[in-house]
């Protein structure tokens, strides 16, 4: 029945597994990346299950499942940014090479910088980050006043870095998506207060004191997901929980509590924040008019979150060897509905699966966040196995118990590995 409806195109606005563009089990063209040992668990699963597709070394297509997940993360970040009155904008990805020479980063970033020339021989950078571009924007505004400050501006865009060793899929790409927030304050004190604001960065749990590296500035914190595959080396104090990145080279005794010993562990760096002071506003002459009528340099901060890296890090940390697991809020679809097999006894109640789809779809928190596995020529068991591999947080099977006088559905909660029978009438509430 379902198959006929799809063929005739009468079911619109429904997400069908049969229609999903999800090319699976692709062997990458680049023979170098075929070696199993060079793939992280998340890269292998995301490629095998059609979430991403490799376009070249360190370059990936985000297929519909991957794009959905990224969009969910962007929505979460947008919500958090609204809470701190940050405004979203889009800066050009192509920035004049001249800016990078003025700040000294043309040299400092060296070969990691993707540079190119236009037809007039003018140099450009495919931006790896946007301090230069946004500071130049501020510098170009005549008579920026203290009344317009503090200002918080952010974007979610692609960044380009010619990494020495791009690897592990979205964890370290040549091109990746970053959320970058820049703050502008009237004084160093105000900028420090801004830096301490909660929600400045969405990941709060794992701040790490870090060296500022080529970004510059005096204070900086990294944010890590603890994971064995993580390329960052961290030191954690067994006594007070202080964490430092290896670049800061801490002594064996904790600098925070001065009695605990520091243990070594690995992490995936997902975010990095910097209190920049006037590192960029000075060379690029980004000034504002103070209350006293004088000109002063903007005090800046920058806050970067690796969006595509966070997706991969979540999958990396949570997945089983052969089954993908997502942070529930980032799963491409929250619910997968599996109707009965064609020609089976249960197929007389196939309409219950469709009704459930429409009912859930009318609830705000599930709208367009459901998919129905309409490949009814396949057994329920086979489709269930696939849905588990993709890691939809809830899988609802319309099976044998749906034939009862009071129909019940099987609900599989992937994370707790619990299967429950829920009456049809109670299912929306339960989910
Ligand atoms: P790493 O130490 O892993 O090379 P980084 O310190 O060079 O990262 P930052 O300049 O601090 O990176 O950029 C902010 C965030 O962008 C990082 O915390 C990370 O989440 C993300 N990021 C950086 N490089 C990459 C990359 N090549 N691929 C994916 N995400 C990246
Ligand atoms: Mg780097
Ligand atoms: Mg780093
Ligand atoms: Mg960093």
Image (cartoon, rainbow, N blue to C red):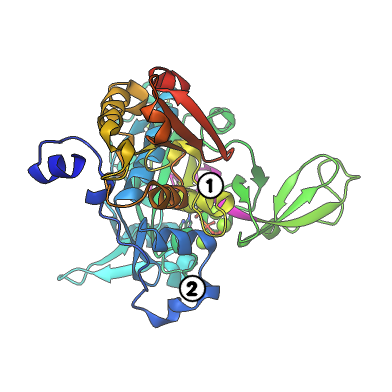
**Considering only order in the chain, which callout, 2 or 1, is on the residue closer to the N terminus?**
2
Mark 1 and mark 2: span between their CA atoms? 20 Å
- The residue at 31%/27% (across/down) is 356
* Dot 1 and dot 2 residues touching (CB under 8 Å): no
**Within the displayed image, which quadrant is ligand 3 positioned in?**
bottom right
Q: Residue furthest left?
A: 8
The percent coordinates of residue 214 (x first, y second) are 53, 58
> Count of labels shown?
2
The percent coordinates of residue 418 (x first, y second) are 57, 36
The percent coordinates of residue 49 (x first, y second) are 39, 58
Crowd class of label 2 (few under 14; some 14 to 19; many from 20; radius 10 Å) = few
Give the vertical position of 132 relative to 6 (above or below).
below
Which residues make up the magenta segment?
A: 267-285
The quarter of the picture where the N terminus appears is top left
Residue designated by label 1? 271
Q: Kindly state the secondary structure of the residue where label 2 is placed.
A: loop
The percent coordinates of residue 298 (x first, y second) are 44, 36
Crowd class of label 1 (few under 14; some 14 to 19; many from 20; radius 10 Å) = many
Choose between 88 and 351: the one closer to the eye. Answer: 351
The quarter of the picture where the C terminus appears is top left
- The residue at 53%/62% (across/down) is 41
Residue designated by label 2? 164
- The residue at 33%/77% (across/down) is 29
- Residue 308 is a magenta residue: no
Quick check: is the Cβ at mark 1 less than 8 Å away from ligand 1?
A: yes
């Amino acid at each position: 029945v379902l198959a006929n409806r799809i063929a005739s195109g009468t079911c619109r606005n429904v997400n069908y597994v049969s229609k999903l563009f999800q090319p699976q089990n692709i062997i990458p063209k680049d023979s170098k990346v075929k070696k199993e040992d060079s793939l992280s668990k998340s890269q292998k699963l995301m490629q095998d299950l059609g979430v991403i597709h490799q376009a070249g070394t360190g370059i990936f297509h985000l297929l519909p499942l991957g794009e959905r997940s990224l969009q969910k993360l962007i929505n979460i970040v947008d919500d958090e940014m609204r809470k701190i009155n940050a405004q979203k904008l889009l800066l050009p990805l192509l920035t004049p090479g001249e800016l990078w020479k003025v700040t000294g980063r043309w040299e400092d970033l060296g070969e990691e910088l993707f540079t190119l020339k236009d037809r007039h021989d003018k140099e450009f950078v495919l931006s790896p980050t946007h301090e230069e571009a946004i500071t130049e924007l501020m510098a170009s505004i005549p008579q920026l006043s203290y009344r317009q400050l503090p200002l918080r501006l952010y974007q979610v865009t692609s960044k380009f870095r010619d990494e020495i060793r791009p690897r592990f899929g979205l964890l370290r790409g040549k091109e990746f998506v970053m959320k970058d927030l820049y703050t502008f304050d009237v004084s160093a004190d105000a900028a420090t207060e801004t830096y301490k604001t909660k929600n400045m960065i969405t990941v709060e749990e794992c701040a790490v004191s870090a060296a500022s590296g080529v970004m510059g500035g005096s204070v900086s914190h990294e944010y890590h997901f603890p994971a064995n595959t993580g390329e960052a080396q961290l030191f954690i104090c067994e006594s007070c929980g202080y964490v430092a990145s290896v670049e800061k080279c801490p002594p064996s005794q904790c600098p925070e509590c001065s009695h605990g010993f520091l243990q070594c562990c690995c992490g995936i760096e997902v975010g990095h924040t910097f209190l920049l002071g006037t590192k960029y506003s000075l060379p690029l002459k980004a000034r504002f008019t103070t209350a006293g009528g004088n000109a002063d340099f903007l005090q800046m901060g920058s806050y970067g979150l690796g969006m595509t890296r966070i997706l991969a890090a979540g999958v990396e940390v949570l997945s089983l060897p052969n089954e993908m697991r997502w942070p529930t809020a980032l799963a491409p679809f929250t619910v997968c509905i599996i109707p009965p097999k064609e020609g089976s006894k249960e197929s007389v109640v196939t309409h219950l699966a469709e009704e459930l789809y429409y009912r859930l779809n009318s609830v705000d928190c599930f709208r367009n966040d459901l998919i129905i596995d309409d490949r009814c020529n396949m057994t329920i068991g086979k489709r269930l196995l696939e849905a588990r591999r993709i890691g939809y947080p809830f899988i609802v099977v319309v099976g044998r118990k749906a034939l009862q006088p009071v129909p019940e559905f099987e609900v599989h909660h992937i994370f707790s590995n619990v299967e429950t029978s829920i009456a049809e009438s109670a299912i929306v509430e339960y989910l």
